[in-house]
Amino acid sequence: MKKIIKYILFLVVLNGYGQELNLPVWTQYLADNSFVISPTYAGIGDNFRIRANGLTQWVGIKDAPDNQALYADFRIADRSGVGLSLYNDKNGNTRQKGVKFSFAHHLILDYKSKQYLSFGVSYNINSFRIDIENFEPTYEIPIVDPSITDDRAINNNNFDIGALYRYKGFYFSLNANNILEKEIDDFVGIEPSLLLNFQLYSGLIIQSKQNKRVEFEPSVYYQLFNSDKRSSTDINFKYRKYNRNEDYYWVGASYRFLNDQFFKPLNIGPMAGIMKSKFYFAYSYQFTINDLAGYNSGTHSITVGFDFLQGISNCPCAQNPVH
């Protein structure tokens, strides 16, 4: 039992550090919304795209992380786009709320071979709070520490930057999140002052030779935290099929692991989505293959969205296959 408790605490701490000043990333980006990962995707595709996501982690474990987020991006010119990300996250007695304002600009490297380069930047505002009003005595701690008073909250600001390269169906993005150092209490000394983390996202959209309405999309997502060199990788695969009206459905799977534990996945599971008359819906289910498996029924994520004001940009750098 002690091993289970230690493992849960480790994952909660890992999840907490991963979220601070950053939108929690599970598989939302695979719901045809790469803007979740990088500001460079703002303005690529339809003029106005909005996605709402709800994620419940480790269902069955009390006070497990729960997250809601809203993502919107739209094109403001043939070669530029802006975006907005909002999220609310609950993890036990901790609360986080954040907003990101993003801008991206897209360039043509070579018109004939369809090579494009995009740059993006985000300004982040994050609020972190501890719900001390929920603290209650326990058997191990019969009296709540009387020194814990007032509203335990703090606000932070930071920036993300990124670059995206596209060549036909291939895409490669590299992002640096939280590039500014964080102000900390020098007398505590247990939290990192630099929350910089790097994210790499790359994949390839392959059109079937037998059926031009069918696409295959393998992809990989890598994240590295600069403070302690922790890193994880997602290996993903999607199958997508269109109809004559350009509506489509897709199915896929994702495999996430710590890079020093390839055969001990953090999460693995199926997912699926559908686009019908510009309305979007996707669902993913992730379960852990470790000691936590007997204590929860997995992580569930639902994404809904709409595409508005459809219009083709005069610049092919803002026209992109769905991913």
Image (spheres, rainbow, N blue to C red):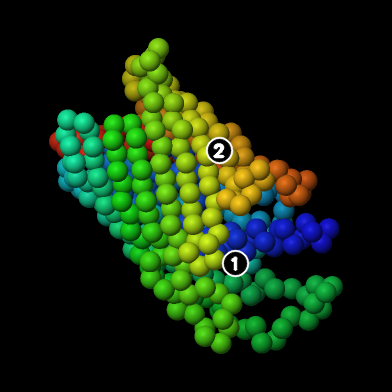
Residue 161's place in the image compared with 112, above or below, is: below
Q: Which amino acid type is shown beneath numbered disc 1?
A: Thr
* Residue found at x 62% / y 84%: 149
Tag 1–tag 2 contact (CB < 8 Å): no
Residue 76's place in the image compared with 312, above or below, is: below
Residue 1's place in the image compared with 321, above or below, is: below
Q: Quadrant of residue 143?
A: bottom right
For label 2, the crowd category at 10 Å Cα-Cα, with few meaning under 14, some 14 to 19 and many 20 or more, is many
Residue 270 shows in this picture: yes
Residue 314's place in the image compared with 250, above or below, is: below
For label 1, the crowd category at 10 Å Cα-Cα, with few meaning under 14, some 14 to 19 and many 20 or more, is some
What distance separates the C-alpha of mark 1 from that of mark 2?
Answer: 28 Å
Residue beneath disc 2: 254
Pick whichever, 109 or 288, lies toward us.
109
Q: Which mark is residue 94?
A: 1
- Provide residue 298's location: percent of width, then percent of height: 67, 44
Q: Quadrant of residue 3?
A: bottom right
Q: Quadrant of the C terminus?
A: top left
Sequence-first disc among 1 and 2: 1
* Relative side of 141 to 240, left or right: right
* Residue found at x 64% / y 61%: 12
- Provide residue 240's location: percent of width, then percent of height: 44, 25
Label 1 residue SS: strand
- Badge nearest the viewer, 1 or 2: 2
- Provide residue 176's location: percent of width, then percent of height: 38, 59
Label 2 residue SS: strand
* Relative side of 183 to 164, left or right: right
Residue 96 shows in this picture: no
Q: Which amino acid type is shown beneath numbered disc 2?
A: Ser
Q: Quadrant of the N terminus?
A: bottom right
* Relative side of 259 to 211, left or right: right
* Residue found at x 47% / y 41%: 220
